[in-house]
Amino acid sequence: MTEEQAFAKALKTIKDGDHHSLRVLLIQYPTLARLRDKTNATLLLKLFELPDGAQNNAKLARVLLVAGSQVNAQRNRQSPVPIFSALQSEKLDVVQTLLEFGANLRIPMQPRKGTVLDYAIELCKEKEDDPDFTTHLSKLIQAYTGGELSGFSSRA
């Protein structure tokens, strides 16, 4: 199987939400975790292009990251990093996984102004009517930053 064929098979496996088969495929083809397709996307970036109902995103992300995917990969400087995409889709289990692997919340957002961290703080403010979400996200932010942030208070 060529690298392109293996990439396509891995992408199907991701779409199916099958993290076990993905792990096997990445063992067989260790370069897949860092490989980029014709659009300059890695498998980790492709994970965030799936519909919101996709299954096992945190497990799939963890498998890719353990295999060597770049946690802060971008197609280009104007494209979002995985942590921003996870925040936009409000998948806090994926946000937590990405942070565990060193995702950078201080990366500037393009074309928006500010950083991914600024977006996360604004998201907490916007979602204040959902205390479970806000508490979980604020704890993740505080763990990342090492404590309270000015202008931001936790409901935890």
Image (cartoon, rainbow, N blue to C red):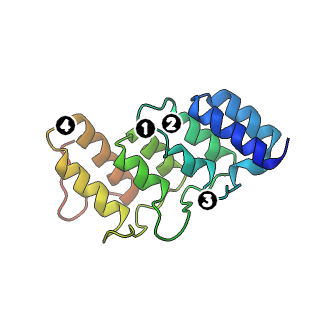
**Label 3 to label 1, Cα distance in Å?**
27 Å
In this view, the residue farthest toward the left is 129
The answer to whether 30 appears left or right of 105 in the picture is: right
- Mark 3 or 1: in front is 3
- Label placed on residue 39: 3
Q: Of callouts 4 and 1, which one flags the residue occurring earlier in the amino acid sequence?
A: 1
Q: CA distance from mark 2 to mark 4?
A: 22 Å
Q: Secondary structure at mark 4?
A: loop
Reading the image, the residue beneath label 4 is: 130
Q: Determine crowd level at label 4: few under 14, some 14-19, many 20+ residues with C-alpha closer than 10 A.
A: few
Between circles 2 and 1, the one closer to the viewer is 2
N-terminal of the pair, mark 3 or mark 1, is: 3
Q: Tell me the number on the disc at residue 57.
A: 2
What is the C-alpha distance between the residues marked 3 and 4? 37 Å
Residue sitting nearer the eye, 76 or 114: 76
For marks 2 and 4, give the one nearer the viewer: 2
- Residue lying at 36% horizontally and 59% vertically, measured from the top left: 145
Across and down, in percent, residue 118 comes to 29, 63
* Mark 1 residue type: Asp
Q: Specify the farthest residue to the front.
A: 38
Residue 14 x, y percent position in the rendering:
60, 35
Please, what secondary structure does the residue beneath circle 3 have? loop
Q: In the rendering, at what x and y percent does residue 84 appear?
A: 41, 55
Residue contact between numbered discs 2 and 1, judged by CB atoms under 8 Å: yes
